[in-house]
Amino acid sequence: MKRILFIVGFTACLPSLPSHAAIGDTIAANGKTVYHAEGTVVTSFGTGYGQYCTVNQIQSTRLYDSNKAGPWTIPYYDGTEGDSLMCWSHVASNSIQYWQDVYGVFYKDTGNMQASGNDTARVLPNGYYSTTTASGYDSDGVYQTNAVVNNAQQLRIAEQFYYNWTNVAGKFRDAADWYFKWDSTTNQSSPGGYFSEYFGNGASARDAYVTIYCESMAQEYPQATSQGYTPFKDNDVNSLKDALLPGFGLTKQADGTYIQTEEGLIPSISIHDLNKGTGHVLSCQGFTTDAAGNLVSLLLADGDDGVTRLQEAYVIERDGYLKLYKDKEGTKPFYTNQDYFIYEVSYISTPDVLKNMLAEYRDPNEAAVWNGHTAQWYTQTDVVDSEIADSTTGWDIAVDGDNIAEHHHGYYHGYATDGRAVRFDDHAAADKRGVMITGTVSASCIEISAEGYRFIAGENAALQAGADLTLNNGATLYSELPLHVNNLIMEGGTSLDSDSTIVVEGAFLVSIAQSTTFNLNEAAISGVDIYTDLDLSLASAVILETSVNMHGHNLTLAFGQQITLQSTDADTPFISNIGTLTIGDEILPEGTDLSRYLVFVSPDNEEYSDMAFIYSNGSITATSVPEPTSSALGILALVACALKRRRS
């Protein structure tokens, strides 16, 4: 006999998500604090240029060092070879990929729709590609032509700049405006605008970047420092640090500590030679301070050095400018025979709408929605947080946008992590509603809001205790594995199939005034056991397809409620072993005729005329009303005749 089991008890479940960027974390300001690299300076990583650097740090799982002279197979679109002047685009590629690790999940596959009017979806440049040969500097600093380099890698974002730009000098802001919104004033062959839905199109006045100049440059170019940011002092290391902090997503506190307030940011710095008029752009991956919190050095990724590494550059004031040195004493310039000073800090300006969407996306109360792209529900161990999800994940996140100023709503591909609420609705096609569960899955809430969902048991399938199971909007659940849930809530004409075996550790509640079938769809099923109090008072109608054993627990119904009996044998209790029967606010005594409290109807919606429904011995029993015998009919006829004569 198949049963639906309800076992009383309660187990609290605290939903949790895997750690992401540490918003709200406090970072100390004294001692040798190294932001991102946690005290480790990478002097060399791998043997090939064009690789990206992997270092454990605060914000995500990756640091990037895209190098020039990549293993390109075609020239720039204007016919020139190489990328000798493109340090700024490689630095921007580092920052954009790092940002995209966080926000790329919101890419809507539309790319340059607003920028060009083209509604053709494009693949988002993301991650890296590998090659086995490349031209570039090896780990000894020797330039090699088409040398075999194991696992040489390059960011696909850098590749897009190579294919779409000329080999020209530029700024971080040129790259940001082109990539995010397509600034048509820049020197390129085709639109970028991959996130123009959020950043605006090429005609938008909104910048995709923030640039903070030093005071001397800001005086020469008043328009240079953007969005109202205060220029940093040419000769003050801590003024430079204050300019770098928002580029890392940090906010300085009154006690000198820093709070992580934004994610996905790596700033760039621009340097300028006082004598030669040349310049260069570098990725700033972190910084160090002394015991008093004063800025000491920067951790820099240089796209010109041909090696994937972070280099520590000491920041020292000389001749009224902030300059870079290889040593603390300032005797060895960071670049030989160059007199570079720091004049600019730039970073991506993330729209508020994306920050708000990210907060909701990471909120465990925002359900992951089954999209039907895959047939299995994997455990969290099978996915990698840092990867941008795509349509193959099987899950989307519904961002409602209640607290979003700009209305960008919809579904965005993501992962259903353990502890997160999940929802099954008509977002998946009718033929994609078979969900195979592989491994052990825990969720804070499982909500089924469409017909035809079937949970299928895969390898080692299990649903851990702690979830609330909600069935609504006419949902039907066909479950081929035991469901272990905290609370079971059924509303809006829902039903459980005969294969469903459910352990309920909390409350079983049927709500919303619609007809609800709490069991079962097959007449052959002979019974159901309920091991918890059952409240059906909010259901306008209750359909019983089989007998129910309450095992001494309490049953609550509503006065005048309709109960439809799909199959009932006379003199057989259809609800037995009731602890207490409450209808409305009244606790009914044994022996009560329920016809004055409830409406009992047959499957064809006709009231029973030959049945009495009695609450007796803890059970509700349908009892046949005996038909009158012939002698009884004769007596009734005589009585009727006597009454007629008396009236005459």
Image: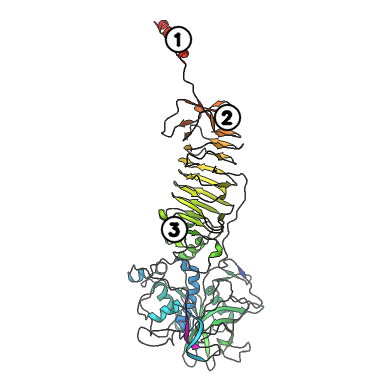
Nearest the viewer among 333 and 574 is 574
Percent x, y for residue 632? Answer: 47, 13
Residue at 54% from the left image edge and 51% from the top image edge = 481
Residue where numbered disc 3 is placed: 372
Nearest the viewer among 444 and 528 is 528
132 is within the stretch colored magenta? yes
Q: Please tell me whether mark 1 or mark 2 is closer to you in this view.
A: 1
Is label 3 in a helix, a strand or a loop? loop
Percent x, y for residue 376? Answer: 49, 59
Label 2 – label 3 distance at C-alpha: 48 Å
Label 1 – label 2 distance at C-alpha: 36 Å
Residue range (magenta): 120-137
Q: Report whether residue 119 is seen.
A: yes
The C terminus appears in which quarter of the rendering? top left
Query: Which residue type carries mark 3?
Result: Gly
Q: Are marks 1 and 3 in contact (CB under 8 Å)?
A: no
Q: Are marks 2 and 3 in contact (CB under 8 Å)?
A: no
Query: Which residue type carries mark 1?
Result: Val
Which numbered disc, 1 or 2, marks the residue that appears first in the sequence? 2
User: Dot 1: within a 10 Å radius of its alpha carbon, few (fewer than 14), some, or many (20 or more) residues?
Assistant: few
Query: Which residue type carries mark 2?
Result: Leu
Residue where numbered disc 2 is placed: 588
Residue where numbered disc 1 is placed: 639
User: Dot 2: within a 10 Å radius of its alpha carbon, few (fewer than 14), some, or many (20 or more) residues?
Assistant: some
The N terminus appears in which quarter of the rendering? top right
Label 1 – label 3 distance at C-alpha: 73 Å
Q: Are marks 1 and 2 in contact (CB under 8 Å)?
A: no
Q: Please tell me whether mark 2 or mark 3 is closer to you in this view.
A: 3
Which numbered disc, 2 or 3, marks the residue that appears first in the sequence? 3
